[in-house]
Amino acid sequence: MSRPINFVMISPHFPANFETFAVRLRENGFNTLGIADAPYESLSEGLRNSLTEYYRVDNMKDYDQIYRAVAYFAHKYGRIDRIESHNEYWLELDAQLRTNFNVFGYKTDDMLAIKTKAQMKEVFRKTGLKVAKGRVFSNDEDAKKLAKELKFPIIIKPNSGVGASDTYKIQSDAELSQFFQQKNPHVEYIMEEFIKGDIITFDGLTDHDGNIVFYASLEYSEAVLDTVAKDGDMYYYVPREISPKLVELGKKCVKAFNVRERFFHFEFFRVQGTGELLPLEINCRPPGGLTIDMWDYANDFDIFNEYAHIIKENQFYSKITRTWNVVYISRKANQNYVNTIDAVCEKFAPNIISIQQVPGIFAKIMGEHGILARTETIEKMREIVQFAHQKY
């Protein structure tokens, strides 16, 4: 392509660690065209320097305004090649714009399967994968009937939703009645059997043809739901070693959902006792928090730069080494820790990568501060976690 690639970035300033996408795309010769509702002056200097042009809209939920912004860029720079936010919240907006401007990637028709949990289950089933029992219920009576079939405890969550918000673990008829009183009347909910076990992920990036060029996994100290409920500590990590069974199932899922030139984040239940893996849901975006930075630290490469290479040349150049386990350890303001963050950094200086300040909206789960560390062994990692979380 003789002209620069025109890449429209929806909300390029959020989350802050995703600003590096703009930096690397610009370094690789792209026209980086940002659209958001934040005042230009409020963007970081690094982001401002990495955007070819920025178009501010008053309201990101007003499709006409966003459409006009993209049309303006198309008029000025020529055909739009990519439109992306890397953000679950704007998944449908991205798809609608790609549909209207005929841009490569997921279109509006693809959204049902990757946004609603009921449709995801169907795709998993068709691929021959076993899933947790459950379905969407139509009213309170239907929900009571379904709860009898599935038996308490059960999980209820929005059929289309992000993360652990508006998700309930329900143990009895009384709790179910309570849910009926407080549920959002405008939301469609799905009910599932409660599976005893933990969640493990299969994450990564595919090339233009849907081949996986990089994959990793995440393991969590506990379910996000539990962290929120008790407002306590958590940690999660990118392990060096990934079970071959997880890789095999993950690859099937990537193929089933036709993930092309995209990051992906698949969640699986790992059943307690048997270790059986059941697919839970797909997210067609990078994993949240600092995970993609953690991939960089785990492999000593630059995934943001490789993403630019995939779009430009369909090539991934870095060697995947999996040299390190990388862990994020939360520190909550409401906890009485024995050791200060400084003490943690001093004791484990060779392992500490950085200390993160967490914005308010994420602090309930991620803590007000986060310690990023990397270790060669899982034992060493657990030692750091224990020291950082030790209480009086």
Image (cartoon, rainbow, N blue to C red):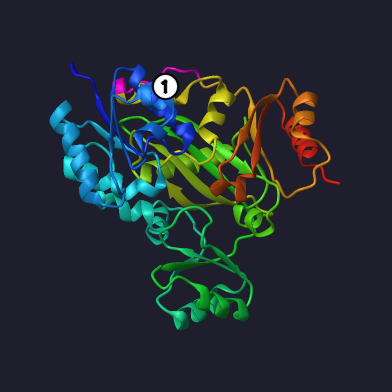
Q: Secondary structure at mark 1?
A: helix
Q: At 62% across and 81% down in the image, what residue appears?
A: 174
Residue at the front extreme of this rendering? 41
Q: Circle 1: is it few (<14), some (14-19), or many (20+) Cα within 10 Å?
A: some
Does residue 45 lie above or below 161 as drawn?
above
| Residue 384 visible at all | yes
- Residue 262 versus residue 243: which sits nearer the camera? 262
| 246 lies left or right of 212 | right
| Residue 78 visible at all | no
Q: At 20% across and 49% down in the image, what residue appears?
A: 64
Q: At 46% across and 83% down in the image, what residue appears?
A: 141
Q: Is residue 317 magenta?
A: yes
The quadrant holding residue 48 is top left
- Residue 209 versus residue 224: which sits nearer the camera? 224
In the image, residue 269 lies at what x, y percent? 57, 52
How many discs mark residues in the rendered view? 1
Residue bearing the label numbered 1: 305
Q: Which residues are magenta?
A: 312-319
In the image, residue 307 lies at what x, y percent? 39, 26
Q: Is residue 203 magenta?
A: no
| 215 lies left or right of 66 | right
In the image, residue 373 lies at what x, y percent? 67, 29
Magenta highlight: main SS? loop
| 263 lies left or right of 180 | left
The quadrant holding residue 345 is top right
Does residue 148 lie above or below 63 as drawn?
below
Does residue 226 lie above or below 307 as drawn?
below
In the image, residue 240 lies at what x, y percent? 62, 30
Amino acid marked by disc 1: Asn
